[in-house]
Image (cartoon, grey):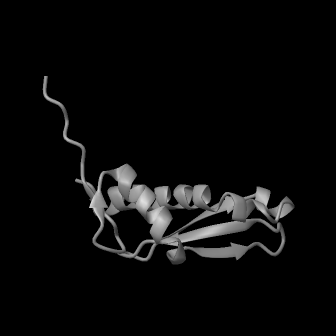
Amino acid sequence: MRLKKEAMFTCPYCEFSGKRSEVHNHLADNHGDTLGVRVDEFTGHTFFIVTCPVCKDSYEQVTKKARNDPSFVKEYEHEIRLVVFDMLLYHMQGEHQLGE
């Protein structure tokens, strides 16, 4: 029985490379400054925005709980970054063949 070798990924912002989970954590730990944030003026919801450094497509993730709890974003910042960077990695895999 042959084991499938796990794909290696390279960070889209620097030279770091590793398994998907390693690059995922690296992004959240080191590249949070690449994310945008906006607050919807009508709902008060906070959105985190990630933009693909290759094609400039953008994706948003809403954090509804931030509306009722101002400390939510600060308390869960790392987890929010993981969710948003997961969207970027899926985009990079699907559109730019990252990790193949």
> For this view, does 84 lie left or right of residue 98?
right
Question: Which residue is situated farthest in the top direction here?
Answer: 1
Which residue is located at x 49 percent, y 63 percent?
Answer: 28
Which residue is located at x 33 percent, y 56 percent?
Answer: 93
**Quarter assignment of residue 47:** bottom right
Q: Position of residue 74 (x, y in %)?
A: 71, 65
Q: Position of residue 66 (x, y in %)?
A: 77, 61
**Quarter assignment of residue 27:** bottom left
Q: Position of residue 13 (x, y in %)?
A: 36, 74
Q: How many callouts does the rendering have?
A: 0
The reply to whether residue 97 is visible in this rendering is no
Which residue is located at x 24 percent, y 43 percent?
Answer: 6
Q: Position of residue 49 (x, y in %)?
A: 58, 70
Q: Which quarter of the rendered picture does the N terminus lie within? A: top left
> For this view, does 44 lie left or right of residue 25?
right
> For this view, does 29 lie left or right of residue 1?
right
Question: Which residue is situated farthest in the left direction here?
Answer: 2
Which residue is located at x 42 percent, y 56 percent?
Answer: 24
Foreground: 84 or 22? Answer: 22
The reply to whether residue 3 is visible in this rendering is yes
